[in-house]
Amino acid sequence: MNYRHAFHAGSFGDCVKHALLVWLLRALMRKATPLFVLDTHAGVGRYDLEHGPAARTGEWRQGIARLLDDTPAPLADYVGLVRSLGLYPGSPALIRALLRPADRLACCELHPDDAATLRRNFARDPQVGVHHRDAWEALGALLPPKERRGLILIDPPFENPQEFTQLLDGLAAGHARFPTGVFVAWYPIKHRAAVRDFHAQLRQSGMRDIVCVELCLREPLDPTRLNGCGVVVINPPFRFEQEVPPILQALLDRLAAREPGEGIALRRLADE
Ligand SMILES: C[S@@+](CC[C@H](N)C(=O)[O-])C[C@H]1O[C@@H](n2cnc3c(N)ncnc32)[C@H](O)[C@@H]1O
């Protein structure tokens, strides 16, 4: 395991994923009944952007740094949380900040050092369970939750090309155990072919009610670069298709550098 999220914290990919995550959680919390959240690839939870790995790559300067001043209205909720939480919040910290007293979060992290840091960050928090375990195995073991309402965030490192297949298998396995869960998976857009195959397989998977959203900084022609990213959502909450595009557009306006092929997209891959 070479990937360490600390090098990429606050990058444009994090901004897309985390802004959507905040919208999704708020949407699910419109109902008062308790919610379970599973973060299968959690990282360490919070990140110092000014020192260490994040400072070395500086990816956050093309990401969250561009959203902090004069924040556009559709991003105000996400950026407000980032400001209030101090260190840049990874997905576990953002989720934790939004939990109501009866909600629960389970976080899985396989890297031993990162799992230990994550555990320290949530020590003595009765609403957060930290598991040093494999994400794909956890999707079988931790679903369905007793609450019967849940959001499952799947955010693999994409260190190797098989990870699209692994992600498809993981979504299918999780969905088979918990068909009403809201599954949310991040994916990179390096070139179109891998993403086209991924979408085609989702369409043929038999799972219903699937949408994906994408933000591209440029035409994905050079596969050595992260040219964009997407998020696939199974069982999106009510008004997703109306309320999410303004968030993506605000992200694009701030994060893109006017390169050919930049843009956002929302595609329905399977009907309800
Ligand atoms: C993209 S990062 C997660 C970032 C985090 N979700 C966030 O938004 O702040 C992916 C994480 O998954 C961990 N990881 C890689 N393979 C894993 C596996 N099979 N099971 C659980 N964690 C894994 C990596 O160590 C890394 O910390």
Image (spheres, rainbow, N blue to C red):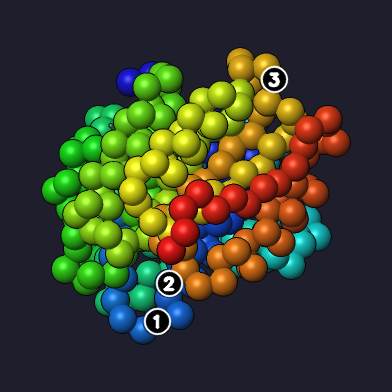
Residue 33, x across and y down, in percent? 31, 81
Task: Kindly indicate whether the residue at mark 3 contacts the one at mark 2 (C-beta within 8 angstroms).
Answer: no
Which of the two discs, 3 and 1, labels the residue nearer the N terminus?
A: 1
Residue 142, x across and y down, in percent? 17, 53
Task: Report whether 164 appears left or right of 149.
Answer: right
| Residue at image mark 1 | 31
Q: Amino acid at mark 2?
A: Leu
Ligand 1 shown in quarter: top left
Which tag is nearer the camera, tag 3 or tag 1?
3
Which tag is nearer the camera, tag 2 or tag 3?
3
Indicate the secondary structure of the residue bearing disc 2. helix
Task: Report whether 222 appears left or right of 209.
Answer: right
What residue lies at 63% left-to-right and 67% top-to-bottom? 243
Q: Amino acid at mark 1?
A: Lys
| Residue at image mark 3 | 221
Which residue in the rendered view is the most extreme toward the left? Answer: 141
Indicate the secondary structure of the residue bearing disc 1. loop
| Residue at image mark 2 | 28
